[in-house]
Amino acid sequence: MSERSALNPAPAVAATDRTPSLPQLVLLLAGSCLSVLGAVLIAPVLPQLTRAFAATPGAEVLVPIVLTAPALLIGLTAPFAGVVADRIDRKRLLLLAMVAYSVFGTAPLYLGSLGAILASRVLVGLCEGAIMTCCTTLIGDYWSGARRARYLGLQTLVATLSATVFLALGGILGGSGWRTPFWLYVVAAPLAVPMALKLWQPRRRSTTLPLAKLPWRQLAAPCLVTLFGGVVFYALIVELSFVLTGVGVTSTGAIGAISAIMSLATAGGALAFGRLAGKPPRVLLPAGFGLAAAGLLLVFATASPVVITLGAVLTGFGTGMLLPTLLTWAVGRLSFDQRGRGTGRWTGSLFLGEFACPLVLAAISAGTGLQGALAVLGIASAIAGVLTAVTLRRHDRPLDAAGH
């Protein structure tokens, strides 16, 4: 495949009398929110969970991994889910993953050991990898041009807004005990019913020809940057409750509210991307990394909950710009036969970064303390912003309305 055809591939979907509309968009956006549910819902109750399993060796490290274990499985399995989506069937994989998500997501309601809970979270991540890959791929399948770009940006915005709701709910429900938030995972099973009725599997123009090869050179840069971006994005999601507890904020309701404010700022960043999407990655990525760096350094520099909240808002706004920029950069130019695999690889990169986040911060904080580790990450984020600006200066051009 030539470089030109890799950047502007021909469509590969057969003509059909089925036209996607609002019901399909709503269902795919709702499904995209489930990976956010898994990522943030129990963040406000992590201190409770740590106390509940204080007798378990290594609980201080294992409890944050309970939150991030799904991210590891998404990172490892999303590329394979993309292969299944391209070669077999997007819809059937999505429906199977939705039902299994409810089963494994609610398992901590009755599991009695930290190890068993961690295992259930691993299985949740397996389901989330398939759900996220299929939903994003189907958005790319059903719509094209400016509408596709707009809906991919809307996917990030809606997922981020849902994080605000889930963080607040996690804090409120956590007041009844650390197990209570896990009840929300049941929502995926009933959501699978309208998906089965309203979604359909697009058809390839030819089922006998081999799948188009992935443009690896095109995907490598956004996936590598996304790997680090996942660490920056997830840092305060997983650690903010510990930072706030350390400065005297112990109410799960207050922690959930502050986390929700940060998440709302992330939504604001995603909304700003909608107005700035015509700018090239060499402009938007340094801006996003720079804002995240400023916020992390502000969290490091204070013991005031108000100033920490301000730092969290800056970080959230920056990462809200980063994610849709990275997504449209990575998958906006892929053909139908490439879209599932490309989406899977981008999704895998993001969630591998999220899983690595608490491990990286734990390693750094052993010598600096948690807020010191956030400062180191802030400096690294600032450096990443400079490097992306320099590296992409000669190689990137603005994305057009179609994401090309």
Image: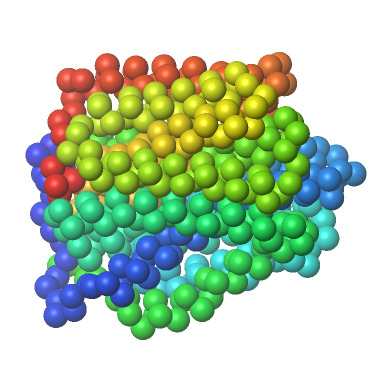
Q: Nearer the viewer, residue 99 or 374?
A: 374
> In the picture, which quadrant includes the N terminus?
top left
Q: Nearer the viewer, residue 166 or 327?
A: 166
Task: Give the percent coordinates (x, y) of residue 331.
Answer: 27, 47
Left or right: 270 with respect to 185?
left
Please tell me which residue is depicted at 77% across the width and 62% down the height of the picture: 176
Task: Give the percent coordinates (x, y) of residue 258.
Answer: 59, 43
Q: Nearer the viewer, residue 324 or 162?
A: 162
Residue 357 shows up from this direction: no
Query: Which residue is at the far right?
Result: 55
Please tell me which residue is depicted at 37% across the width and 63% down the height of the picture: 29
200 versus 301 height, above or below: below
Quarter where residue 398 is shown:
top left
Left or right: 188 with respect to 139?
right
Q: Looking at the image, what colour scheme do you see? A: rainbow
367 versus 216 height, above or below: above
Task: Give the percent coordinates (x, y) of residue 377.
Answer: 53, 23
Please tell me which residue is depicted at 18% across the width and 78% down the height of the picture: 18
43 versus 92 height, above or below: above
Residue 142 shows up from this direction: yes
Quarter where residue 391 is shown:
top left
Quarter where residue 298 is shown:
top right
Task: Give the percent coordinates (x, y) of residue 98.
Answer: 50, 70
Please tell me which residue is depicted at 65% across the width and 27% down the height of the picture: 304
> In the picture, which quadrant includes the C terminus?
top left
Task: Say how many tags the image has.
Answer: 0
Left or right: 202 with respect to 60?
left
